[in-house]
Image (tube, rainbow, N blue to C red):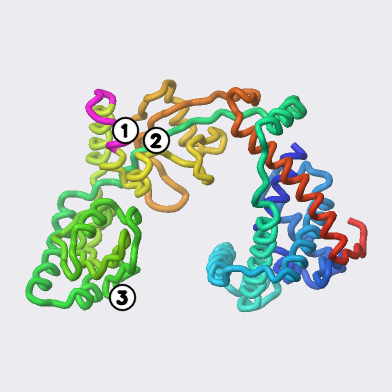
Amino acid sequence: MKKVLFVLFAALMTVMSGSALASASTGPGQIVAIVGNEIILDSDISEQELMLRLQYPDAKNEPQLRRRIFENMVNQKIILTKAKIDSISVDEKSVDDQASARYNSLRASFPSVQAMESRFGLPANRLKQHIRDDISDQQKIEAFRRKNFRDVTVSYDETMAFYQKEKDRLPEVPEEVSVSQIIKLPEVSAAEKQATLDRIRVVQEKLREGGDFAGLARDYSDDPGSRERGGDLGFVKKGALVPSFENAAYALKAGQISDVVESRFGYHLIQMIERDGERIHVRHILAMFDRTKTDIPETIALLKSIREDILAGKTTFAAMAENYSDDPSAVRDGGLIRSSSGGTKLEVASLRPELQNVIAGLKNKGDISQPEKIEPAKGEPFFALFMLNSRDEAHAMTPERDYAKLEDLALNQKSQELYNDWIESLKKEVMVQIMSDI
């Protein structure tokens, strides 16, 4: 457990808010270390310790947590100092975007700006600057690390040597599944569809009479994101739009306007502005469905019909996901659910309880659930079918079954050893002065 936690903390320190933000929230505090021109405060360590203990319950059982936080902070400051000496640059736009997203996330956790300023002891504009500086520093650190470790690899022999040495201490591989889904938002009632269609037909008639597309978009479109820009969506890549919209858009020539196009959002009129290879520049007018007027029985009946056709061998789950799922990625992956890292195997224990319950009822490869209502933490409820593609029971790690995982672990260990040696070499170039015991 301690090894796992240490790796977790080391990784987390590279992405969580750093000392500038922490010290701002707790006051000057006692200086515990000076690294180059950077200082580390006792309050910096306390802030990160608190954040870790709140976010990761297992951290409560880690007696050396504070010491490891401090050691990691010293190492990070050493790398930052060397990165600045070597004039490592970062993408300023990326820094701005990430800083804005992090500030907005932080702001959302407080009832008011005043409450946030009181908690951190800083006005909002200075808080934003601290966040930006921290992200810029972290990007410099990561860029400098990548520059020095991008070519690290492990051979088959190294992987097997790692396994022989560590096999008695390797973690058990948890139960994993591969699952596909077909998502359907509740079907809009026939009456609401007709009313929405009537609204878009009125706009279509105005266009036929010579109306200006951009002007009509500002007056009539229900898309708040593009309405004020005359419906302009800018340049978009192929695969970025919902299929029905994209298929209609790519069929247009410059200046041409589509007929009415239905998507899960409502009815669209689309105008092609220009095409650049696989990218298109379009504008649209949207008459949006009122999703408070839905026909849930019809949605469930559709999913049951889809399920019956798949089980009868008339079609495949992937084909039906591509044609019917309201999940945009279904077109690319045939409904396959991917992990946050992009993998196709999902740890059962990491899934939401409601999905764990559904998967527990799928015993064999190809089993498909009945339509299930899903209520996500954010967004509107939907209905879905789930199909089990494979199930791997929990087991001891072996090269025969888990070579890729072993290779990753061996690579991580080798990288960590090289990283530790690298830090020791940097300490000869950067002054490190420890002012207090932790």
Q: Which x, y percent locates residue 57?
A: 69, 44
Q: Is residue 63 left or right of residue 211?
A: right
Residue at the spot of label 3: 229
Could you tell me how far apart the alpha carbons at marks 2 and 3 are, in whole angstroms? Answer: 38 Å
State whether residue 262 is above or below residue 317.
below
Q: Is residue 177 magenta?
A: no
Could you tell me how far apart the alpha carbons at marks 1 and 3 are, in whole angstroms? Answer: 39 Å
State whether residue 66 is above or below residue 198.
above
Lower sequence index among marks 2 and 3: 2
Q: Which x, y percent locates residue 7?
A: 72, 45
State whether residue 269 is above or below residue 154.
below
Of the numbered discs in the image, which one, if any, rests on residue 317? 1
Residue at the spot of label 2: 180
- Residue stretch in magenta: 311-320
- The amino acid type of the residue labelled 2 equals Ser
Could you tell me how far apart the alpha carbons at marks 1 and 2 are, in whole angstroms? Answer: 8 Å
Lower sequence index among marks 1 and 3: 3
